[in-house]
Image: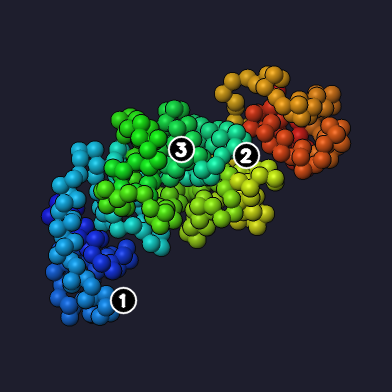
Amino acid sequence: MERDELSYYLALHFTSGIGSRRLLTLCQYFGGPEQAFHASAQALLDVPGFGKGVTDAFVLSREAALVDARKQLERLSDETSIITYYDEGYPELLKSTYSPPPLLYVRGNADLLRGEKLIAIVGSRKTSDYGRRAAQEIAQGLVKEGVTVVSGFAKGIDTIAHTATYESGGKTIAVLGSGVDVIYPPTNKLLASDLIASGRGAIVSELPLGTTPDARNFPWRNRIVSGLSTATVIIESEVQGGSMITASLALDESREVFAIPGDIHRPSSAGPNHLIRESRAKLVVNADQMLAELGWIDRPGMMKRPQPVSRANLSLFESKIVDVLEAAGGPLQVDILAERAGLDVQDILVQLLTLEFKSIVRQMAGKQFMLVG
């Protein structure tokens, strides 16, 4: 979109009472943003969804909005672009959602938004060692298959997913609940700079430059995270957590949702466990399982650990499970394994999941487990 036309498009975006759907309706009805901006009050009343209140507010505030729009354009840096709903660079998956943002501010590599394979990794700000390891391994597994990782750049799981992707040589998109020039949390400023400089990252927001973080913005941010992505995986979240909003939004758009199961005694595992129990998300323990479900690889495989794990790195209970499986010399059904290890079935399932992430055990059909090797 040309700069002059873009200024009117931005002005519509900034005008009081004009949300995403009304902005697109205006442009389609009048044939373009400049015509829509200059439309008379009488003409506006004929637009579907425009009553007198909305029309009056629009007419009163549009000139001030045009001033704000031109100021925004003056603030654009060489590394920042604006992609409108009508531009070729606007991501098709996001365009197909119920409430697509009318425009996106992008710092970094905007081409990433139109990648063929995008998966969102989201989760709690309050993480456990288990959650951090899971996020890192899932991200690394996705990178190996050329998947671009999308997340919300928040503390915790989001930041771990972005960092693991970047450090593995992959591509990642960070969607903010602030302007793209206001990095939040501030501890991620260096990461943001690295992503942009590398050409393997994009910082994205629908909010104007200079917008500071606000709790009200984050649910709207989440719809972009899920809307950009073919699938979303939840790693640690309380039932009322923001990641559950992202999962719900993805489900509303008929996108795939995956969940990493967690410790039943940990509040941050309640969200993923709830999604799995209600059959709203598919249980996965590695990236290959997700990729296979999406048809992006032929069959799920076990993620290889970055380096060998010795007995010294295992907990007492993990070592006990390994001892039992070694003595058996083959797969054991989980009930038998629990009995021989002297553990409850629910407790041993948590330990086995950890061992699966470490690629020490593999689950077979019929809840049987065996050592990898």
Closer to us: 204 or 250: 204
| Helix, strand or loop at mark 2 | loop
Alpha-carbon neighbours of circle 1 within 10 Å: few (<14), some, or many (≥20)?
Answer: some
The residue that mark 1 highlights is 49
Q: From this viewpoint, is residue 314 visible? A: yes
Closer to us: 150 or 205: 205
User: In this image, 319 relative to 77: left or right?
Assistant: right
Q: Are marks 3 and 2 in contact (CB under 8 Å)?
A: no
Residue at image point 42% right, 54% down: 215
> Residue type at mark 1?
Gly
The residue that mark 3 highlights is 159
Mark with earlier residue (1, 3): 1
Vertically, is 52 above or below 249? below
The residue that mark 2 highlights is 285
The answer to which quarter of the image holds residue 19 is bottom left
Mark with earlier residue (1, 2): 1
Vertically, is 86 above or below 319? below
User: In this image, 320 relative to 67: left or right?
Assistant: right
| Helix, strand or loop at mark 3 | helix
User: What percent of the width, then of the height, locates residue 197?
Assistant: 30, 30
> Residue type at mark 2?
Val
| Helix, strand or loop at mark 1 | loop
Between the C-alphas of marks 1 and 2, the distance is 46 Å
